Amino acid sequence: SPVFKQMLFGAGMREVAANSEVPMTDVEPEVASLFLHALYTDEIKEDAWDDDEIMCHLFTAFHKYQVDHLMKRCEARIIALTSKDVVAERLMMADLLDSPRLRKASIEFMTSSLSQLSAVQATEGFQRLIEQRPKILADILAKLSPPAAAQSEEAR
């Protein structure tokens, strides 16, 4: 990881000193343990693999510490575990972490049918999306019905 490389070998970094620790202050102990297990073994524990909330926390940690191959694995699993109840939250996370793949998958999941979108709109997560990230609504609408300029370009 470029982040750990800088922390452990970068000049002036306190983590360079012998017997120093690398703080993970914004990661819950359970997630930190799963993170380290995956970092050293290249495996994500089965109980974490089946828990989409834990996968989101791991995804965030792998993103922060730039462990790309494990981040991509978590992202793929989050996409596979997406449901109408959590898709709006996953879309906001994708927006926050600049994850185009998760963003696209979330929007496609939401807009796969009008009944699916209606079900998603009834969730608390969608209400939070409206309040916290209203600009994302334009992307959802554009997926359902591309703007007139985009439609005329597609027809060409």
Image: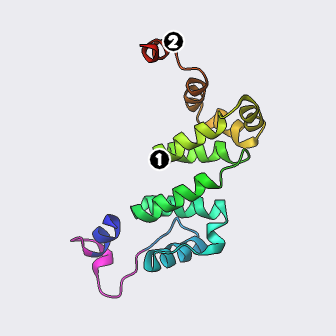
Q: Give SS at disc 2.
A: helix
Q: Residues within 10 Å of mark 1 (few under 14, many from 20)?
A: some
Reply yes or no: does residue 16 show up in magenta: yes
The residue lying toward the viewer, choosing from 148 and 92, is 148
Q: Which residue is mark 2?
A: 148
Q: Which residue is mark 1?
A: 99
Q: Give the residue type that dot 2 points to.
A: Ala
Q: Position of residue 28 (x, y in %)?
A: 58, 69
Q: Is residue 5 above or below residue 20?
A: above
Determine whether, in the image, residue 31 is placed left or right of residue 36.
Answer: right
Extreme-front residue of the structure: 156
Q: Quadrant of the C terminus?
A: top left
Q: Is residue 56 above or below residue 41?
A: above
Which residue does the image show at 30% across and 87% down from the upper left? 18
Reply yes or no: does residue 139 show up in magenta: no
Classify residue 39 by image quadrant: bottom left
Determine whether, in the image, residue 130 is placed left or right of residue 153.
Answer: right
Q: Position of residue 65 (x, y in %)?
A: 41, 64
Determine whether, in the image, residue 77 is placed left or right of residue 156.
Answer: right
Q: Which residues are magenta?
A: 9-22
| Proximity of marks 1 and 2: CB atoms separated by less than 8 Å | no
Which mark sits nearer the N-terminus, 1 or 2?
1
